[in-house]
Amino acid sequence: MSHSPVPSPLPGGPAPLGRAPGPVPLHVVAESRPFSEPVRVVVVDDQATIRLGLRMILDNEPDITVVGEAADGVQGVRMARALLPDVVLMDVRMPHLNGIDAAAQISADPALAGVRTLVLTTFDDDEYVYGALRAGAAGFLLKDADPESLVSAVHRVRAGDSLLDPGVTRRIIERYVELSDWHAGSGVASAPGGASGLELATPREREVLLAVARGLSNKEIGDELFLSEATVKSHVRSLLTKVGLTNRVQLVILAYEAEVVRPGR
């Protein structure tokens, strides 16, 4: 698989930002399109050269197409509503509306039920990314990720594998828990919505949860636990239903908060 490198700034200045099309009627879309179709991506970043580099990498893939670009969160949300992409690649620090608030708006809109947000971050963005965990972002990707990691991340998010880059995600989640109520009094942070619901999990579901917390994909979990990928997906869906959450990232936060998984382990 060959990829175009991220380009250097162009001598003629930034590439012009594509404008979002006019308003279109909103409607609820299916959770995902048939995987025979290319993954449709919207790139949201306030730096034109980064947008251009991401577009070049993604458009070089036959099964991915960039359908739009936006320079801030406001434009990003508007474009998500207009184009109904599979994945929104969202920067964090942007003018007008930051990527965390934009991700929250996308997650909260029932008309965008099939749109998943992949947050672009750096190690300096931790305090922002904690908010993305609650905002319903599907995963995280370092801005300096290599092209293969970017392509893989887009496919995994579209397929429903929310947890990306185990080392980065684990670090972010552990830091999130440390900054919450972990060290205050009881030693257990408050779980979303009160009671965690994890007491309803079966022993096998707890095994799956521990593997999810390690950043494993459904296929990797299946290989480790000798389960089919479909069975793993069923266990993950059951866990999400029992605890009242919407994605795997939130599920891992809950595991840390309920001390099913402890920082540093």
Image (spheres, rainbow, N blue to C red):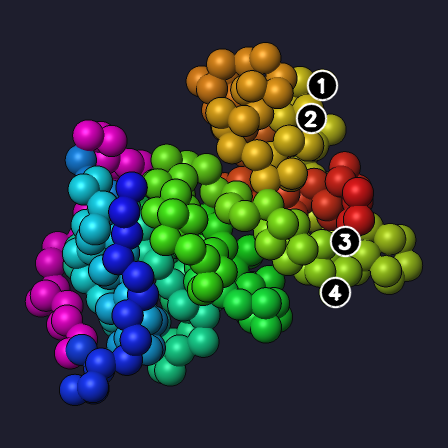
Q: Which residues are magenta?
A: 16-36
Which tag, 3 or 1, sits closer to the chain's start? 3
Whole-percent x, y for residue 69 in the image = 22, 66
> Which mark identifies residue 206?
2
Q: Specify few, some or many for label 4: CA neighbours under 10 Å numbering under 14, 14-19, or 20 or more.
A: some
Name the residue beneath numbered marker 3.
189
Q: Considering the image in quadrants, where does the N terminus appear?
A: top left
Amino acid carrying label 3: it is: Ala
**Within-10-Å neighbours for mark 1: few <14, some 14–19, many 20+:** few
Circle 4: element type: helix
Q: Earlier in the sequence, mark 4 or mark 1?
A: 4
* 3D distance between C-alphas at marks 4 and 1: 30 Å
Is 23 part of what is drawn in magenta?
Answer: yes
> What element does badge 1 sit on?
helix
Residue 91 in picture, x, y percent from top left? 40, 68
Q: Which residue is at a point 49% across and 25% down the rendered structure image?
A: 219
How many numbered circles are shown? 4
Which mark lies nearer to you, 2 or 3?
2
Q: Quadrant of residue 240?
A: top right
Query: Which of these two is toward me, 85 or 215?
Result: 215
Sequence order check: which comes first, mark 4 or mark 3? 4
Indicate yes or no whether the magenta region holds residue 161. no
Q: Which residue is mark 4?
A: 179
Quadrant (top left, top right, bottom left, bottom right) of the C terminus: top right
Q: Note whether 5 is above or below 226 in the view shown.
A: below
